[in-house]
Amino acid sequence: MSMEYRMRRTLPSNRAAIILPVDHGLIFDRIEGLETPSAPFPAWADSDVTGFMMTPGQVKQTEKFFAARPHLTRVLTIDTYYDFAVLDGGGVHELITTVEEAVRMGVDAVKMLFPWNMSRAQQAALCHRVGTVIAACEAWDIPLVLEPVLIGAPRSEETIAEEERVARIAYDLGAHIIKIAFPGEERTARLVEELKVPLVIAGGPKTGEVSDTVDAVAGTLRAGARGVIVGRGIWQRDPADGARALKEIAALTRAVSFAD
């Protein structure tokens, strides 16, 4: 399979992607709404999502489920992190599997965090690690979704500006898709226009009302983002509210299309 084939599966051109992340167990252990790691798939697979962001264990346990639903894409998280505090340089970020293994498992893309609140030496090591992964992705024709983030930082203007800056570093390293927390419609539009790399927007933790989540998605799509990665804002809500949010988000994503 080619890079183009996997990119088109991950980010369809006839709509914006809705990727439901359920890989939180790598960091949060037993998280509310994800007590049974395989539960989200039958619960949400038929709710107009385009795919899921998953752990290696989830991929292995759900092979038959996804074989029967080839229209759904799978993005494999290949890293994890622990004990980050804002700008203290004490975090640990490591790979948990390889690009070659991801290809063997048949997923459509791989995903890595790009946590920047660390020491200069750790930042340099991280860039080297990402560069090695991107080289492997090019060799195996599989896209990397790279997520610039300041882990644990408050959503201040300073944090948002810094994550926008780090998104440019992700571009220079060769990321195929950039995932970033919503920096606002204007900043999103600027990143889309200047970087000319597919941008997907992360929903983050459950906050506010359903209308807040839907409004943020609408802003990302107006700005030209290729998709949204929204999880806790869906599956940690009351089931009826989560279903309503996803239905409204799906309608928005089907109202846009992208040139091939």
Image (tube, rainbow, N blue to C red):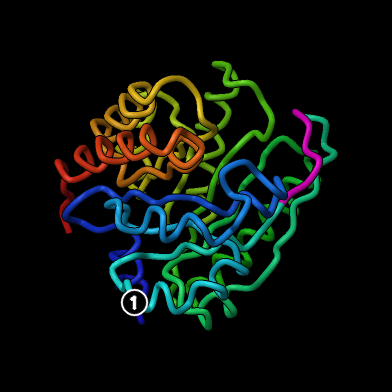
Q: Secondary structure at mark 1?
A: loop
**Label 1: how many residues lie within 10 Å, few (<14), some (14-19) or many (20+)?**
few
Q: Position of residue 246 (x, y in %)?
A: 32, 40
Give the residue at x 59% y 79%.
101
For residue 141, which quarter of the picture?
A: bottom left
Quarter holding the N terminus is bottom left
> Does residue 114 lie above or below 64 as drawn?
above
At horizontal 58% and vertical 28% (from top left) the residue drawn is: 162
Quadrant (top left, top right, bottom left, bottom right) of the C terminus: bottom left
Going by the numbered disc 1, the residue's amino acid type is: Ala
Residue 85 within the magenta-colored segment of the rendering = yes
Picture residue at 63% right of the left edge, 73% below the top: 98
| Residue corresponding to mark 1 | 68
Chain part drawn in magenta: 81-86
Could you tell me what secondary structure mostly forms the magenta stretch?
A: loop
**Residue 128 appears left or right of 5:** right
Q: Pinpoint residue 111: horizontal percent, then vertical percent.
A: 53, 58
**Residue drawn at (70%, 45%), measured in percent from left and top?**
28
Q: Is residue 216 above or below residue 175?
A: above
Residue 186 part of the magenta segment: no
Quarter residue 173 falls in: bottom right
How far from the left and from the top, in percent, is residue 21?
49, 50
The answer to which of 55 and 144 lies nearer the viewer is 55
